[in-house]
Image (cartoon, rainbow, N blue to C red):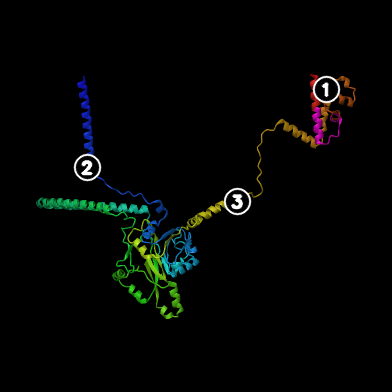
Amino acid sequence: MSSSKNLSVRQRWLLLGAIALILIGAGYWWYTQLEWEEKEVDLGYSKEAIQNDFLAAEIFLRKHGIQATTVKNLSLLDKHSWRNIQLGAQDTIVIVNGYKTLSEDRYDSLYEWVEGGGTLITSTQNPFVGTHTSEEDVLLSDFNIELAPEEKDEDDRDALERLADDLEEAVDGKSKPDDEEDSDDETTDSNDNRDETKESSANKTNSDSADKVEKTTDTTKSKNKKNKKKAEEEKPENYYRCSMAEPPVEITFAGEEKPLAFDFSNSRQFIYYDYAEPDEEQDSDTPEDETSSEQDENPATETPEEDGSFRESLEAAVASGESSDNENYQYRGKHENLLYFDIGDGSITITSDNHIWANHRIDCHDHAYGLWRLVNPEGRVWFLVNQDAPSLATIIWRNASYGVLAALLALVLWLWAKSLRFGPVLVIEQTGRRSLAEHIYASAMLLWRKQEHPQLLGLLRKEILDRLDDQHPNLAQATQDERALFLQELAGINAADIQKALYSIALRHPQDFAAAIAHLQTIRKQLHGSKL
């Protein structure tokens, strides 16, 4: 018995050991065959980046030793300070959405600050204002700049009509090859009927060539699919964010070997009217090939340099009295995305879109490097984000003025219909059935108003005296005083009140009449009780 027990224990240990060895071997094999892969998961912008659209630009400038601050209003332009931080003479102001936000006083103080060494970077964008207002931007008009008109789509068809036309074109494109194949089959059939001997030999060669063509087409299709997949896989992360499909705008900067690339595809160009001589206009009438080559050498977006504003230069020219020379000068409009002006010791840069330095676009092309070239590294950079949007009432009136007028007219008509024109409206109250006491009270009041109330007293007095004579015959020959004394003992009422209630005629006051009725009712009840 002991040997059999020992064998069973040994078998159990061997089984457990074998299971442990199998598990260890499987774990080792899994660990050696396991391939570790590292993947980057985009968790989106941080809370700070969501609240500050120019946080990436601030971090970029701080890494290069330039202090940067974002302010979500334009109070710095009025006070020249923000949270006890003064606006320095060498600072840089980047106004975002600043189109049509500068008043005359604000622009004059800002212009003086620029002449003293400040740097201003503004744009022709403002989604809160747009081009619908008749106001003019003081800064742009001073530099003779205006927004280019919006490009209208020549195709006036609706989206559904366009989709239907595209589907028809696609169907026609598929049906045309089928028709061509049918025509080819018909021609081959006619040729077969003409010469059967040539057909047998030609069929062999045609079948071989057709097989080769099918193989080549299949290989080209497969190659094209593979190339498309590779192209989609090889697209960078910022391909759509930076509009890589469109060519960037190249702008020449002084001291740079190559022009810097910027993505202004999300904005419209502005028109800069240059005061040019007639010779320059004749040069602009050259063929397109020559103009394109000249633009490559000296791009139209190259930054012009001026000692003052365009308006001041014109005023100085007119004041000099050179009228004959001025007649030879004419305006010439240029479509630009970025212009640079030297103003005194400072500078003003005008762009068509300052959002190229936002968090989601600053890493595109040469945006970050272009910002570093435009700012003054000796001062602080201020990003002033305009958030002064029009009120809701202004937006509603701008977009639905006729609807607002119709609603106001309807309100006036409703108030007129509900108003009181000839006094209050008579309302007839619906009351229930009246009680018997109300009828009695109404009849009594009628008798009182007609001075017929003694009739009520007479009936009650007669009833009491008759009952008194029936119950007490010995009082039939009694006087009024004797009867009053008897009733006083019976009812507990003063004899004078009893005599007044039974025999008095001068009851002119309502209180006296009510008191007499009450006394008579009491006496009647007592006489009725004594009879029982």
Q: Position of residue 471 (x, y in %)?
A: 84, 20
Front position among marks 2 and 1: 2
- Residue 10 image-quadrant placement: top left
Front position among marks 3 and 2: 2
Which residue is pictured at 81% across the width and 28% down the height?
520
Is residue 435 rendered magenta in the image?
no
Query: Could one spot residue 356 in this view of the protein?
Result: no
What's the amino acid at mark 2?
Thr
Measured in 3D between alpha carbons, the distance from the residue under mark 3 to the one under mark 1, in whole angstroms, is 72 Å
Q: Position of residue 238 (x, y in %)?
A: 32, 55
Q: Main secondary structure of the magenta part?
A: helix
> Looking at the image, do the residues carrying marks 3 and 1 touch, with CB atoms under 8 Å apart?
no
Q: Secondary structure at mark 1?
A: helix
Q: Which residue is mark 1?
A: 467
| Mark seen at residue 87 | none
Task: Indicate whether 60 appears above or below 420.
Answer: below
Quadrant in which the N terminus appears: top left
Q: Secondary structure at mark 3?
A: helix
Which residue is pictured at 24% across the width and 43% down the height?
34
- Residue 476 image-quadrant placement: top right
Counting labels gives 3
Q: Which residue is mark 3?
A: 416
**Is residue 401 left or right of 371 when viewed as pictured?**
right
